[in-house]
């Protein structure tokens, strides 16, 4: 995209097509805005034309009756102008808010399509910055840039036509004023674009730092790192504000230059208009009306140039959102070849054949893995960190696609199972489950939004959660603080297990669900899990071997594959790598 004097020659039309596409639903409102803008432009010319008529005709003739008529007409015109401006503001508000609301919804849906791979790769602060700061630039485009360009074009066409009708020679004086800005403007445009982009990047860094300081307050306090965090926060803020101040300086300088050009043109028009008036080639009324309309034209002409330059600055932010909206999901959940009716046929048999996977590197986290799991079988996954345990669960949930091999459930490749149905029948419990800032009941209901209060209480009782819930101030209607900070680790886990009881999946996956708990809470959670695991296929990643001692099989993973396999007793007697791991952890010895 090239810029000259603030006028933008668009080479990348796709970006603007994308922006305009969100206005398609509201095109009637937009066309109504165009009509209202045209009426406003015509009414703005009523005053100079009335002044011209009063000076040239009514005053010399002393026609008071006509003067009263003109004043009444002028008053009506002012009322109409204010009315149409109010309508215009309402339409602008509508056009500003609704397309942006649609955009936010579509971006949130797109974020969900991008899924876990994107969330794990991009920081939360960067995503929040995209949804808050960058979308504001698009809101500004709908609120001000597009309407201002539209109104300015309409007003310029009407106003320049009016000026030419008064005296075409005077109208030629507008050209030098415009050309001065046209040729010198690129200098300010380049500076604005440079510092606009820099400010946008530093604003994003600052927002991410704010987020890190908020979510990391516990670690900051524990490590007594107030001074370090404050210094980092202040440095980020100062860098952002310095760049913003440079941008504001450039913009104010540009505004000064703009006003200088307008007033130079004003002086030239006064000189030449006076000469023409003295020679009798221009009436006094035309002279006054021309000066009145000149400021309207120049203000809109140079204003439109500056608006076009500003949208070049906003383009850096808008492009980030545009690029995000065009990201392709690494797992296309709309490419399911057939729909497998899991509710009728799902048994929970899992077959993993020659499975390999990596995170975009040459090192395979999962390497040629083969596992056969019968329906209702309980499998424990153990191994050192980085051996591929958690990655395997993500592949089972279809968060990622393997680079080689396949996973089958009941003989059906999971790529052929509708993702919604797949996850309806596979539940996963993490080490630190997410708790919403909502009531206990709503947090449990998250497992099944249609669950009744009775079903929620039963699920809580099955998860050994009812007892501690009944001790809370408002029992099931108690508001839990954000991320469940008012609950213990065991209490959060039991709420997560209650969700699973509501979902009633055929396959349950757990990722070190008891590793961070004390003995009492671990016992309560294990009792709840054992009840949950009944008649369900279960795969549990375990750090504490005691929690999987009675499982049907234990798989010891190493370098992305199965190194040892068997029951606890079999592996313990074998005295291989599993035995050595237990011995090194001093467990059950």
Image (cartoon, grey):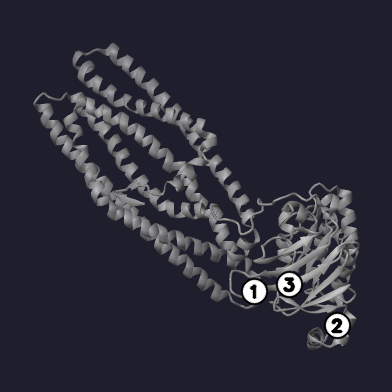
Asked which secondary structure carries label 3, the reply is strand
* Res 56 quadrant in image: top left
Question: Neighbour class for label 2 at 10 Å: few (<14), some, many (≥20)?
Answer: some
Relative to 378, 134 lies left or right = left
Q: Which residue is mark 2?
A: 571
Q: Which residue is mark 1?
A: 364
User: Which disc number belongs to residue 407?
Assistant: none
In the image, which is nearer the foreground, mark 2 or mark 3? 3
Mark 2 and mark 3: span between their CA atoms?
19 Å
N-terminal of the pair, mark 2 or mark 1, is 1
Relative to 143, 530 lies left or right = right
Relative to 528, 400 lies left or right = left
Note whether 582 is above or below 370 in the view shown: below
User: Residue 210, percent across and down?
Assistant: 55, 64
Q: Residue at x 22, y 13 (%)?
A: 62
Question: Neighbour class for label 3 at 10 Å: few (<14), some, many (≥20)?
Answer: some
N-terminal of the pair, mark 2 or mark 3, is 3
> Of 568 and 63, which appears nearest the observer?
568
């Amino acid at each position: 995209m090239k810029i000259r004097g603030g006028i933008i020659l668009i080479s990348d039309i796709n970006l603007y097509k994308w922006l305009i596409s969100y206005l398609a639903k509201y095109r009637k409102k937009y066309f109504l805005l165009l009509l209202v803008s045209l009426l406003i432009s015509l009414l703005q010319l009523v005053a100079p034309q009335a002044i011209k008529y009063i000076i040239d005709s009514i005053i010399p003739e002393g026609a008071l009756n006509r003067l009263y008529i003109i004043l009444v007409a002028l008053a009506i015109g002012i009322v109409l102008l204010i009315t149409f401006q109010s309508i215009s503001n309402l339409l602008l508000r509508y056009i500003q808010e609704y397309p942006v609301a649609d955009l936010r919804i579509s971006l949130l849906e797109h974020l969900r399509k991008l899924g876990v791979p994107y969330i794990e790769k991009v920081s939360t602060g960067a995503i929040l910055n995209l949804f808050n700061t960058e979308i504001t630039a698009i809101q500004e485009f709908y609120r001000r840039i597009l309407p201002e360009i539209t109104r300015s074009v309409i007003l310029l066409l009407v106003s320049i036509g009016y000026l030419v009708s008064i005296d075409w020679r005077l109208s030629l004086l507008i050209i030098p004023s415009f050309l001065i800005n046209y040729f010198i403007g690129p200098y300010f445009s380049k500076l604005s674009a440079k510092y606009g982009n820099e400010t946008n990047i530093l604003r994003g860094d600052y927002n991410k730092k704010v987020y890190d300081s908020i979510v990391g307050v516990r670690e900051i306090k524990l490590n007594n790192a107030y001074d370090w965090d404050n210094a980092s926060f202040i440095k980020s803020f100062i860098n952002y504000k310095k760049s913003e101040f440079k941008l504001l300086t450039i913009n104010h300088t540009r505004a000064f230059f703009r006003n200088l050009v307008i007033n130079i043109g004003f002086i030239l028009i006064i000189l030449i208009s006076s000469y023409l008036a003295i020679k009798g080639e221009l009436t006094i009324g035309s002279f006054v009306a021309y000066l009145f309309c000149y400021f309207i034209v120049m203000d809109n002409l140079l204003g439109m140039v500056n608006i076009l330059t500003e949208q070049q600055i906003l383009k850096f932010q808008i492009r980030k959102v545009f690029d995000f909206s065009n990201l392709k999901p690494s797992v296309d959940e709309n490419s399911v070849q057939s729909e497998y009716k899991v509710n009728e046929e799902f048994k929970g048999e899992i077959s993993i054949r020659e499975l390999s996977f990596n995170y975009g590197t040459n090192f395979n986290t999962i390497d040629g893995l083969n596992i056969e799991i019968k329906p209702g079988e309980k499998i424990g996954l153990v191994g050192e960190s980085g051996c591929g345990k958690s990655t395997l669960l993500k592949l089972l949930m279809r968060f990622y696609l393997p680079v080689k091999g396949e996973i089958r459930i009941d003989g059906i490749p999971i790529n052929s199972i509708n993702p919604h149905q797949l996850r309806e029948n596979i539940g996963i419990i993490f080490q630190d489950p997410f708790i919403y800032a909502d009531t206990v009941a709503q947090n449990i209901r998250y497992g099944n939004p249609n669950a009744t209060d009775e079903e929620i209480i039963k699920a809580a009782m099955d998860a050994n959660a009812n007892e501690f819930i009944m001790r809370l101030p408002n029992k099931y209607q108690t508001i839990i603080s954000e991320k469940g900070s008012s609950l213990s680790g065991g209490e959060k886990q039991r709420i997560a297990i209650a969700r699973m009881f509501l979902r009633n999946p055929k396959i349950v996956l757990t990722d070190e669900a008891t590793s961070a708990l004390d003995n009492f809470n671990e016992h309560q959670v294990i009792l709840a899990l054992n009840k949950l695991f009944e008649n369900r296929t279960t795969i549990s990643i375990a750090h504490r071997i005691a929690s999987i001692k009675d499982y049907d099989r234990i798989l010891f993973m190493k370098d992305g594959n199965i190194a040892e396999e068997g029951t606890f007793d079999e592996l313990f007697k074998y005295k291989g790598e599993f035995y050595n791991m237990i011995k090194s952890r001093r467990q059950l010895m």
